[in-house]
Amino acid sequence: MISFNYETEFELEDEAYYADWVSRIISSESKIEGDINYIFCDDDYLLELNQQYLNHDTLTDIISFDYSVGNELHGDIFISIDRVKENSDEFTVSFEDELKRVVAHGVLHYCGYKDKTESDEKVMRNKEEEKMSMFHVKQ
């Protein structure tokens, strides 16, 4: 089950459609949907998690905690709406597109994609684009 939680004023306009889209991303990677929680927050909230659990003292747009078992995906995905807004300005894309990129990015990590090396990052970016294009496809 895909769920959305809010630690900030932001709320998704169509949770059901986002949940369906994430489910389709999971299926398209031949994975099984378990319990995946998206938590939308602000920079301060995510920075505290970054410091407490990862020993990083930097701002980031997303942190994911993967509890998957085999092909069944489970986890908590924290997204800073402040970072999404700033990144959308920096990369001159709409807030909505940047949000979709980050939402897809989190679950793609659970599907096994990494982004620590340049080659892994390229694969991840291509996968993000592929999955974002599925957002408007009704099945």
Image (cartoon, rainbow, N blue to C red):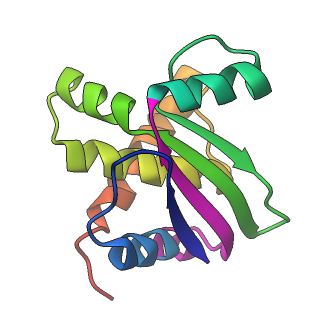
User: Which residue is at 77% across, 69% downward?
Assistant: 71
User: Which residue is at 69% across, 71% downward?
Assistant: 35
| In this view, 30 is above or below 116 | below
User: Which residue is at 68% across, 14% downward?
Assistant: 56
Say if residue 127 shows up in the picture: no
Q: Residue furthest right?
A: 69
On screen, residue 92 versus residue 27, left or right, reads: left
Q: Residue furthest top?
A: 57
| In this view, 65 is above or below 115 | below
Q: How many marks?
A: 0
Residue 78, quarter of picture: top right
Give residue 76's position: percent from left, percent from top.
66, 53
Say if residue 8 shows up in the picture: yes
Give residue 110's position: percent from left, percent from top.
67, 54
Residue 89, quarter of picture: top left
Give residue 2's position: percent from left, percent from top.
56, 72
Quarter the C terminus occupies: bottom left
Please say whether residue 107 is one of the residues in the magenta stretch.
Answer: no
Please say whether residue 37 is one of the residues in the magenta stretch.
Answer: yes
On screen, residue 67 versus residue 138, left or right, reads: right
On screen, residue 21 versus residue 36, left or right, reads: left
Quarter the N terminus occupies: bottom right
Q: Which residue lies furthest to the bottom in this view?
A: 139
Give residue 17's position: percent from left, percent from top.
34, 76
On screen, residue 91 versus residue 10, left or right, reads: left
User: Which residue is at 27% across, 25% downward?
Assistant: 86
Front-lying residue, 138 or 125:
138
| In this view, 77 is above or below 86 | below
Segment tinted magenta in the rendering: 24-42
